[in-house]
Amino acid sequence: MSDLYPVSELLSHLAIILVRPKFSENIGAAARVACNMGIERLILVRDQPPDREAMAKLATHKAAHILETMPVYDDLAAAVAPFSLLIGTTARHGRQRALERGPREVVEAVLPDLPQNEVAILFGPEDAGLTNDDLKYCQLLSSIPTAGFSSLNLAQAVAIHCYEFFYALEYAPKVIAPRPRLADSHELEGMYAHVEEALARIDFLQETNHAYWMNNIRQFFARMRLGKKDAKIIRGICRQFLWHQEQKAVTDKRR
Amino acid sequence: MSDLYPVSELLSHLAIILVRPKFSENIGAAARVACNMGIERLILVRDQPPDREAMAKLATHKAAHILETMPVYDDLAAAVAPFSLLIGTTARHGRQRALERGPREVVEAVLPDLPQNEVAILFGPEDAGLTNDDLKYCQLLSSIPTAGFSSLNLAQAVAIHCYEFFYALEYAPKVIAPRPRLADSHELEGMYAHVEEALARIDFLQETNHAYWMNNIRQFFARMRLGKKDAKIIRGICRQFLWHQEQKAVTDKRR
């Protein structure tokens, strides 16, 4: 792939987001292996500051710079805002989640988006993994194939994903047909907020089925691969609908 | 591949050998990820007993049985004796070593041998890796492709190799044409000892070039893929030559 896009430039579009990791050692180990695979962007979502010493020891001095420049967020929404493709990682539990694939397939699916988009891979806490609320931001799910025992160590899961990305970029076909820039998470979340409001207004969303339908709608839009403009148009329609309803309510009252 | 050989049966021919690891945590982490990938044979070469607690913590209770049944050897030669295909892992250092490939290529090369052979992957100590003396037992070398920083954490390197084996077996073509059983390391080392003695006797091997030529001869035979019978024949020729030289010396003396 290096003919058209240098590998290092493509990798600069890729980030690892660690969501509420418990052990600082795992943050360090993730930094080290990301560095091994040429990925320099590690992002932490955690309300407590990590143990610097434990983290640095596992990172080794070679990956120290990754920890030094690592952004730390309280909140996942803020962390994912600039990304337009989010890959959620889950352990295989037998429960079927839509769109779930192995890392190799995910990498293959995402590669053509890498030149024009910011892509992040999300890893959940060691004990429980990403919640459904975390996964709502994700367009793709990745599960590492395993034998019976499916729970990998956090840094191992990071290693296998980084390795698959680096390997694909280093050895895959020399030319990719890049796909256009997609709407980023910030734009999408703004759109979803308006879609949600509009659907609630017409009682499509009710208390009991709210989460279920919003999840379906998110999956539907994820498949659509919306661009910035698409997200704007959909948002515009919802806004217009809401405004129209507002006006109607005012007129109805006056009658 | 599961049609002809069940994945679990093929994986039972595969072992991970940790050669002089420094940190017991890494032994535990390796056991865990081996277990994740359905590999149950972990072998330790180490003259000091590991720290059981540190090891068990990283293995988690799911992989505890792997640690309990783990054979421990003082000596690498004894550990590799039953294996007929040995894969040595090395970090990329720019120095060209013969036969070096990435793990994916190594797995592809070895898969047809798995039904009829015992295969082991060797991992060296965290700081220095496998020595040339360790690597002499290996028919294949595997280096994980990396960006600039090539030194992976030991358990991460184990993870990537186990993952590649499991992935290939789980998802690769359903049918493999198995290749015959090769001579095991015990048989080969016996043969090499005789070859070495014979070559020394004719002054082909001298003090200054001894190691260099034996290394070349090992690489040559590694490419030959010797079976048990081949090793026996070569050994027989050397033995006969040595006996013949002995007789000649006796006869010469008598004259």
Image (spheres, coloured by chain):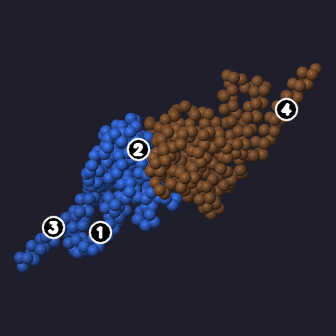
Chain colours: A blue, B brown
Are there few (<14), some (14-19), or many (20+) residues within 10 Å of tag 3? few
SS class of the residue under badge 3? helix
* Residue under label 3: A243
The answer to whether the residues at label 2 and label 1 have Cβ atoms under 8 Å apart is: no
**Left or right: where does residue B86 sit relative to residue A180?**
right
Q: Quadrant of residue B255?
A: top right
* Residue under label 1: A211
**Left or right: where does residue B182 sit relative to residue A133?**
right
- Looking at the rendered image, the disc whose residue lies closer to the viewer, 2 or 3, is 2
The answer to whether the residues at label 1 and label 3 have Cβ atoms under 8 Å apart is: no
Query: Residue A155, how many percent across, how many down?
Result: 42, 48
* Residue under label 2: A29
Depth check: give the residue in front, A126 or B222.
Answer: A126
Question: Is the same chain shared between marks 1 and 3?
Answer: yes
SS class of the residue under badge 1? helix
Q: CA–CA distance between discs 2 and 1? A: 35 Å
Q: CA–CA distance between discs 4 and 1? A: 85 Å
- Looking at the rendered image, the disc whose residue lies closer to the viewer, 2 or 1, is 2
- Chain-order first, disc 1 or disc 3: 1
* Residue under label 4: B243
**Left or right: where does residue A176 sit relative to residue A45?**
right
Establish if A36 lies above or below A136.
above
Q: CA–CA distance between discs 3 and 4? A: 103 Å
Question: Is the same chain shared between marks 2 and 1?
Answer: yes
The answer to whether the residues at label 2 and label 3 have Cβ atoms under 8 Å apart is: no
Q: In which quarter of the image is residue A210?
A: bottom left
SS class of the residue under badge 2? helix
